[in-house]
Amino acid sequence: MILGIVRYCRHLDNSQHCLHIKMKFCQLVEILMHRRDDLSFRQEMKFRNKLVEYLSDWVLGNSHQITAAAAAATAAANVTSAAVNVTNENKETIRELDCAAVKAIAALLAELPLQPEENDRGDIVEAKSQLFLKYFTLFMNLLNECGHAGDEKGKEEEVHTIDMLRTATIQAMSNLLSANVESGLVHSISLGYHNDLQTRVAFLEVLTKILQQGTEFDTLAENILADRFERLVELLTMIDDKGELPIANALAFVSPTMQVDDVARVFVSIFEAKHLLYELLWNLFVKEVELADCMQTIFRGTTLASKVMASCFRMFGASYIQMLIKPHLEIMLSHPELSYEIDPNRLDGDINVLLAAHRKNLEIVAQRIFDSIVSSVERLPPQLRCLCTCLYNVIAQRFPTLNHISAVGTVIFLRFINPAIVSPLENGIVDVQPPYNVKRGLMYVSKILQNVASHVLFSKEQHMRPFNDFLRSNFDDCRRLFLQITSDVSPVQDAQNPPLAMSYISDANVVTLHRLLYYNQEKIGEYLGSNRDHKAGRRPFDKLATLLAHLGPPEHKSVDSAWAVHGDLSNTRFEEIMTKQHIHEKDEFKTLKALNIFYQAGKSINGYPVFYYVARKYKMNEHHADMLIYHVLLTLKPFQHQKFELVIDFTHTCAENRFRTEILTKWSQVLPHEVYDNISAIYIYNCSTWVKEYFKFHESFLSALKGSRKLQFLDQISRLNEFLEGGSRLPSTTVSLEEDLKVFHGALKLSHKDTKVSIKLGSSSIQITSTERTKVLGHPVLLNDVYYAGEIEEVILVDDNQFTLSILHEQGPLSFIHDNCDEIVQAIIHIRTRWELSQPDNVVTHSKIRPKAVPGTLLNISLLNLGSPDPSLRSAAYNLLCALTGTFDLKIEGQLLETAGLCIPANNTIFIKSVSEKLAAQEPHLTLEFLEECIQGFKASTIELKHLVLEYVPPWLGNLTRFCKQSDDTKRQKVALILDKLITLTLQEEEMYPSIIAKIWGNLGQVSDLLDIILDSFIKRSVTGGLGSTSAEILADTAVALASSNVDLVAKKIIQRLMKLIDKTCVSPTWTLEQHLMFEDVGILTRYLLMLSFNNQLDVIKNLPYLLHFVAMLLSTGPIALRASIHGLVINIIHSLLTCSTPSFGENTQKILRLSLTEFSLPKFYHFFGISNVKSAAVTAFRFSHRPGERSMAPYAQHSSDHSRLSLGALEAITDALLEITEACMLDIPHCDWLERWTTLARSFGIRYNPSLQPRALIVFGCISKQVTDLDVKQLLRILVKALESFSDVTLIDAIVMCLTRLEPILRAESPIHKALFWIAICILQLDEVSLYCSGLALLEQNLHTLDSHGVFEYQSIDDVMMATREPLEWQYFKQLDHSVGMSFKNAFHFAFVGHLIKGFRHPEPETINRTVRVLTMLLTIVAKPSKRDRFEVTAESVPYLAALLPVSEEVRSRCRLKHQTVVVGNGMANSESADSMDADVISPSPPSQHFPLTDSEKESQLAARRQKSCEVLNQATATFPTRANSVAQSSNVGVIGGTGSDTPKSWKSLDLEHPDATSGNTSGGPSPSSNRPLFRPQRSSSMPTPRSPKNMDGGRIGSDVDERTRNARTSVSGENSVLLDSEFLTDYATQALTLSILATIVRHTTDENEARILYQYLAEASVVFPKVFPVIHSLLDAKINSVLQLCHDQAILEAVQSIIHNMITCDEPMSQQPPQSLQSLGFGGLWRFAGPFNRSSASADSAELFVNCLEAMVETCLPGDDGDDVDTDAAEYAGSLNSSVAVNLSNSLSSLSVGSPTEKDSGNDFDLARRHIGAHKRSASFKRRSKSSITGKQHEM
């Protein structure tokens, strides 16, 4: 009736009279809601929701806002007629109507769960949220309108009406939100931060009201659905004051017959789980017995009580009855020969005998079963005993004078025991049907037992009378049995067995209960309302109705999933495939199933099941057609063998809902044919124009349906209901289209064929229904096109009789003709506009709020708005705070009291802070939710309020530790989430950045327990952003604030994390660090270090070793800004050492630190750090800034132009500089272990395979080690072996060699490794690698110097010493090495040695050339030592070195003159500036008389000189020799090219004169080292041990005076007395040939004319002195001489060459003599090739392989063992730990090595002089002829 009235009122106009009618109706609704307890409503929740919808439309349609919006929409739609006119005289009435409507809505919304219509998406939660937003937006618009109207001046009555409207609106919003918290709070909570302050005020008042109303926020919980189902169970099992079950009794009474079985099953399972089975049975049995006329008729029908009893027996007695009957049945089955037939009519033969036997058999079985029943009474399930007790009590109460016991027994045997005996197979006792004789016996036994239970003798059946004696004998036992089972169980619930939780109740039973209650709720309400105590029944029903409204409609009863999946699904191949793929378990399938596209519901009038297909719910672009087909198959499966009917809903179906042609084909192939055969009828509802065209397009495919009687087209639901029992189960969205329609008949739709239609206008849709039938599949059909309000794009009134309608996705506008076009257009505009206004402008959805988050969320809203500039908002916030503390019992010590009209000043920050501090201390459990909401509110606040938030948040930050210490991972994750949000806030809030740093991160830095998780969050976010990103840089800067309060801890954790990251790079190593996956992490942490390194926030004193280790490992790595960061880190470290208060460094240390700051800023150090092109490292490192306007990524986007792998020499130089700083500072710190820790770090990385870091670590280890054992060196050699095996990482080999070079001086003097290192250096030279040759030569130089300082060469020649070292491996390894390189140390040691050294002249680096000259000069001295002669004296031992030095040493040329001619020096030779420059760089030999042992004090004093810098370290000699040509051009001026190398401050001193004053011998005129850098000592550090001086037999020591005397003695030898090429000194053929070969090889490969001039003059001399030997070098000189003759213009060279040719031509030696020996026969066939330019080839790899074999054998056999006696205990222990660490940590390069199989010794002698070069004579003759012709041609040209 009420809905009918409101529908009538909806169509009234806005006249004064109609408005008053509407107002009265609203007042009626309000009164109805206030007295609803006295009234009975049908479908109350749906009724109230419908009224809210209608009344809200009135508010939308009548308010000023809707009028303005309608006018705007009309103008936009080009409507020519006037809009809705609202006259001034009606304005007041309309406002009063708004007020009355909102009051009525507020009354309706009280405790009203919203019930939206089911949307096509199937998501009822989303639909409910949208409906909430619609109403909430309406109310917010009303509040805004009230605010605007209040600002205008008007009558007092109008102001009063506005105030009433505002109050009613707030009440309506409060009721709406209170009843729908779970749907509305997340959508509305953001209004607490709305830009409009009046909106905030209103919302805060709403929040205050819902708190005062006692709203429960438990509905926000994640498990709310489970809680609601539990409350549903509680309502069902609720017992009222009378001990009755109102809901259960009502459901039992109103349930239709077809649902009785479901009700019984649900009742038994739920009440038993709640331990209320007795109460259920009592209520049901009482009603059953009350209706019975006598005791014999109870439980005889199919009543609910009987069903419940049967369910109890079935659920609780199954196992008991099986235990009772099965043993006896098995006995009967084991004796199939026994018969139990006692009916004479069924027997043949001797009847009497058979009857006697059969009766005996039957009595035995019956007695056994009865005895079992009597004896098993203790095992009877308690539920069944409870049932018996309840039944006994009910019958005794109803029939007090009758035999109650027999009644109970009758029921037990009749309903429970006897059915199991008669039908054992059906009751699950046996698996197969018993034989006939056994079944007859069981039937007779059941009769006997039933009569025993009933205490009745047989009378009617004659053949049963013989058993009466049996009955009488068991009557007493049966009575005792019944008394026992009915009296032992008390109906009182056992206290020790509490009710079961919901988890123990089957979900299927709960879902069934929901369905039963939902579809019967109206009947339940009527049943409870019909009671005499109407209000008593009303209360539980109201709770039930509200709960069912919250739960929403149940799912359509679906097929049991277990049956559907595991049943027979093998009908089609399609089903097999889908089942094997477990499609039914996928989320996509579950989502599609939940949409209810296809479902079964109800039956037709023919009794067939009805299936529904809703076409519009299927979206071809969103849903998988195969899954839909599979879902249909599963749904049809239980009904595939019976008839069914199908309803297809085509309402609002369009192209996106269609099936493609191939999918239609698949439907026909997949569905079994019996499905099509079993379709009894197909009902098509709402066929549209598009469906018609679709059917026409697929007419051939649907030809079977054309004209079929099974197919029926329906256009009204009422017609459909005629075919369905109980009405249709179409979706509510379909059904609602026929409700409240305004129909315009007689319209004409204009198209190519005009059609008569009816226009139906609903609340949110338009329907265009044809009035003329159209043929579709042979059937006459009325087409109905449905368009929703959201699809209406434009409506245009063409004239008074025509309008056009534009619809979304339609090809063109629709044109209509009608007499009332203006009214139709206005109605359409109203529909569209109302829909638009119900859509929120900006939907701001808050994050999901849980019940425990409500106090924290509302607390932040109140505190934040307390600081608002608006006084009304401050008052509202204060009242909210009061309500909040009262509702949630927050301990605020009575400071707050809600008061109306309270005046709160704007500056109340102190009050807000005090409230926050007290709550943070008293209510720490609110911390997580409060902070999360603070961050949410911060983003939406103004600058002023943001500062306020930063004031009241800090007291809560310390509480975060409470949640980190707990084992609850969820809370820890919540803390991490809050920190991540704070990080996001820091990154986004540029203007607030300084305040956030100070207030948030500064306070968090004081909480030590949070630092780990904070740094985790920082690093994770930085890595996400990437190296150099805005986030990474800002967070690195923010880390400074963390460290400001806790320097030690932050520095420690950052360093530890970076250490772990660098350490992890060894797990999966890469060639370069930049290629590693963790490089960005390393780079980011490096930036953190840089930010923290200023002002000693890295605690440098504690962490210096780690910082220096990082510098060494990351030096010159990554992009240019990162390289500059490493440089800046070093500068900041030194700065921190200078500025730190503790410890206090001495003046000398401070000077060193200051000079280091200057030194590291020099361009050369910029080059070392890889930033040579940078003007300022500090600017480059900090060019990126997170300040506004400077967010450039340039330093990280591009790499340095010189981006290459780090030079090991640069690393060595920087390490030495850092070492000097470290040692200087260590002198002022007692017991400082910096160096030991740094060494340990370097060693640990040096022994682990990592191509990117291992070479660096080895260099650092070599530079900073203070002591080394044989085992350490052996470990390095093993690493070298593995590196050489692959020969792919030359840098690693280079680093190992350089490390050995630095370690050798501190190795014990007695170690045999010294001598082995000589051959290792030689092998390195043989690898023919440019970089390795340099380091190998340095190792060789250091080795010779070390051995010489140990006095090894005083009395033994170098060849004897070294050849003896390799003797054990000579034939197996070294012979092969010599053979591969083509120079035999065994045949001619010195020449082979020189052959390896002169290759250094071809090296591209001047420093290596200088070192080559130094080594050759040193060897002159070493060779001369054993014989105590002048080093320039020409002997067979010294001639190779003199010959090699000839082109580069003026002194050698002056001391070793030509015999037959004067050396002509060309104009290109420069004058000499230093006659004794060579002596400045070589160690002078000591005369024999000076060799005396050193005293202890002298040994001590010399210990400091034991360790010198490598030749590689900062050797500035390269600066003075920019090119090879220049160096040779000045060779006549400077005896040794590297002579000026000692002028540099950090030049290598290991080969300088050993006496401290030896540097005074520098005569070059350059400044001394002390003048450049007085504070930097020549040695690396003062703490380094110094090698011992060479020992003297007489106890003396070589000093400067000895060197002076030696020099004088040497210069006294006249040049005339020493001739280099003299047959008197070079007597044997091999020496002569090899000497000439050395000269020829050098001249062959030289490119310098000065060298060539000198060499050709000496070769010309040789052609005279050694005419027999000279042909050996013809092949070397042939091409070179031809080139000289053709291209050279130097007169001296030409003359020398002419002399050579002339001497060869005029040679008087007979040509017929034996040809000269070749270089190959002398073992030097590879001399000229090896000594040439560097050209790495496959021969290098072969040499490396031979070297590996030799080195393996040398390490494992010749060098001291790991447990040798000559190694001290500490060293052995360290070696053991080192080896164990190798085994654990290293990859293949560092594992223990095994000696490879040695190459078998060759049987032949490679150096047999009998092997001659066959073509030597022929080549000699040819050479002479070519030379003669060349000379002739040259003379002609001249």
Image (tube, rainbow, N blue to C red):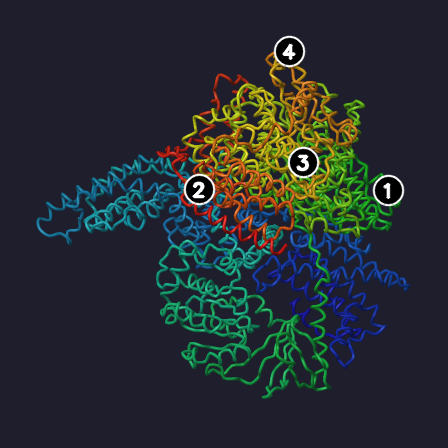
Task: Find the distance from the CA under tag 2 to the CA under tag 1.
Answer: 124 Å
Camera-nearest label, 3 or 2 = 2
Q: Earlier in the sequence, mark 1 or mark 4?
A: 1
Per the image, the residue denoted by label 3 is 1537
Q: Position of residue 1146 (x, y in %)?
A: 79, 22
Q: What amino acid is at disc 2?
A: Pro
Q: How many other residues sit within 10 Å of disc 2, few (<14), some (14-19) or many (≥20)?
A: few
Which of the 4 quarters of the picture holds residue 243?
top right
Q: Position of residue 856 (x, y in %)?
A: 72, 43
Q: Earlier in the sequence, mark 1 or mark 3?
A: 1
Q: Position of residue 392 (x, y in %)?
A: 41, 42
Nearer to me, 1239 or 1362: 1362
Are the residues tagged 3 and 4 within 8 Å (C-beta)?
no
* Lateral position of residue 1437 relative to residue 958, left or right: left
Q: How many other residues sit within 10 Å of disc 4, few (<14), some (14-19) or many (≥20)?
A: few
Per the image, the residue denoted by label 1 is 908
- Residue 927 seen in the figure: no
Mark 2 lies on a secondary structure that is: loop
Q: Position of residue 491 (x, y in %)?
A: 47, 38
Are the residues tagged 1 and 4 within 8 Å (C-beta)?
no
Q: What amino acid is at disc 3?
A: Ile
Q: Earlier in the sequence, mark 2 or mark 1?
A: 1
Camera-nearest label, 3 or 4 = 3
Camera-nearest label, 1 or 4 = 4
Q: Is 107 located above or below residue 947 in the figure? A: below
Per the image, the residue denoted by label 4 is 1496
Camera-nearest label, 4 or 2 = 2
